[in-house]
Image: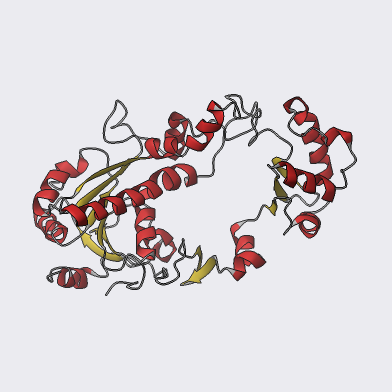
């Protein structure tokens, strides 16, 4: 039995070859939504990879089998499962799966309807395809890291969110689902080449459009989303932080009014970029004069486009987040609940499996005629 047979992806069978980073996260997304995701774990633990047990949230809701993919018998076992699944996803360097005898040609010969998802940083082709790298490197090369930071400071990005998850897992997930739809219509599977450099570059298209229209600059701190006083993060008197994002004029006017600055001539022309540094300093001093809670009491819930900066534990307790049950606790581990939400077939977060826990069950029920 799968952990979740009621989500919108119920009935979808997916093999996930053990890896780190974006592939496991993609598998979690699909398992949350009802897919039967079978994690092909290593037969033995690898000391180079940290085993977090129940804290490995990205493995929740999956079933686990343990195979030695250097053992021909186990390779044949995996190929037997390939015959009965909709998709396989792997995150090895290009060529590794082929050397194991599990490349796309071999798998598609066993199951012509198979969708074969490949997740890498640089992609399956190109001069850097075989080089090592991580999230921050892929973002740097794709251009997505450029705007992350203030003028004169080194660019920074939230660890693994923009690259591994945004440019990687999300694009692999939509690629797999799109290819499965095509396979069900045509009877033919295909290979999905999901690369973080591709996905993170693709996410830049909103900014690329603004840049082409003259609304975004190649210089950090000179554009409407990274330069103005009204689109920033500010430190409060208690050391906590808040955000304002009053992008549209009507929201800016409301923010200025609530801050008691409606009559201040300095804020009469908020889009004058020459004045942004001065106005930013005035905002910085103002927000430093009260605590985060005081600013929440004044601004939260209004159209001033405001939110406090919360750590995950605080976020889980926030009234809005709590009302929507954005976070939950499974086996004692705080984690975000499945997203997005479905009115008829809601997703469901399952437990993290032990390595090889479902070996016999998977081999038995996947062998049944579909």
- Can residue 48 be seen at all in this image of the molecule? no
Residue at x 32%, y 31% (from the top left corner) = 131
* Residue 114 pos. (x, y %): 18, 53
Q: How many marks?
A: 0
Classify 317 as above or below 145: below
Q: Is residue 336 visible?
A: yes
Instruction: Specify the farthest residue to the right.
Output: 263
| Quarter of the figure with residue 213 | top right
Instruction: Specify the quadrant that holds the C terminus.
Output: bottom left
Taking the image as shown, residue 309 lies to the left or right of residue 126, namely right
Q: Residue at x 23, y 52 (%)?
A: 182
Residue 360 percent across, percent down from the top left: 18, 72
Which residue is pictured at 27% across the width and 70% down the height? 357
Give the percent coordinates (x, y) of residue 29: 39, 59
| Picture quadrant where residue 355 is located | bottom left
Q: How is the image coloured?
A: secondary structure
Q: Is residue 118 left or right of residue 242?
A: left
Which of the two residues, 360 or 202, is positioned nearer the viewer here?
202
- Given residues 105 and 128, the one toward you in this image is 105
Left or right: where does residue 103 sit relative to residue 336? left
Quarter of the picture containing the N terminus is bottom left
Expressed as whole percent of the image width and height from the top left, the position of residue 33 reads 37, 65
**Residue 308 picture quarter:** bottom right
Q: Nearer the viewer, residue 117 or 266?
A: 266
Q: Residue furthest bottom?
A: 1
Where 50 falls versus 53 (above or below)?
above
């Amino acid at each position: 039995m799968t952990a979740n047979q009621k989500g919108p992806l119920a009935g979808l069978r997916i093999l996930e070859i053990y890896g780190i980073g974006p592939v496991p996260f993609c598998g979690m997304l699909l398992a949350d939504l009802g897919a039967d995701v079978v994690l092909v774990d290593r037969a033995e633990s690898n000391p180079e990879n940290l085993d977090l047990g129940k804290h490995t949230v990205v493995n929740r809701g999956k079933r686990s089998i343990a195979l030695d993919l250097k053992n021909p018998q186990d390779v044949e076992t995996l190929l037997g499962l390939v015959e009965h699944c909709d998709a396989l996803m792997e995150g090895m360097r290009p060529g590794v799966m082929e050397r194991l005898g599990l490349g796309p040609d071999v798998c598609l010969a066993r199951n012509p309807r198979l969708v074969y998802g490949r997740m890498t940083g640089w992609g399956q082709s190109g001069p850097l395809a075989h080089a090592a790298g991580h999230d921050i490197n892929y973002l740097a090369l794709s251009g997505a890291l450029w705007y992350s930071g203030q003028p004169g400071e080194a660019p920074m990005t939230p660890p693994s969110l923009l690259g591994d998850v945004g440019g990687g897992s999300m694009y692999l997930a939509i690629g797999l689902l799109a290819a499965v739809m095509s396979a069900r219509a045509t009877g033919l599977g295909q290979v999905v080449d999901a690369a973080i450099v591709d996905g993170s570059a693709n996410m830049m298209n909103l900014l690329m459009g603004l840049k082409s229209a003259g609304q975004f600059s190649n210089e950090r701190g000179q554009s409407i989303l990274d330069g103005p006083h009204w689109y920033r993060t500010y430190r409060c008197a208690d050391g906590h932080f808040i955000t304002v994002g009053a992008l549209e004029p009507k929201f800016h006017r409301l923010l200025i009014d609530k801050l008691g600055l409606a009559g201040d001539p300095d804020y009469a022309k908020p889009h004058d970029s020459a004045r942004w540094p001065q106005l930013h300093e005035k905002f910085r001093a103002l927000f430093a004069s009260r605590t985060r809670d005081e600013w929440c009491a004044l601004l939260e819930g209004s159209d001033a486009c405001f939110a406090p900066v919360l750590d995950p534990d605080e976020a889980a307790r926030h009234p809005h987040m709590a009302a929507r049950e954005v976070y939950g606790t499974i086996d004692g581990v705080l984690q975000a609940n499945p997203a997005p939400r479905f009115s008829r077939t809601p997703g469901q977060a399952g437990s993290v499996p032990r390595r090889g826990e479902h070996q016999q069950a998977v081999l038995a029920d996947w062998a049944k005629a579909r």
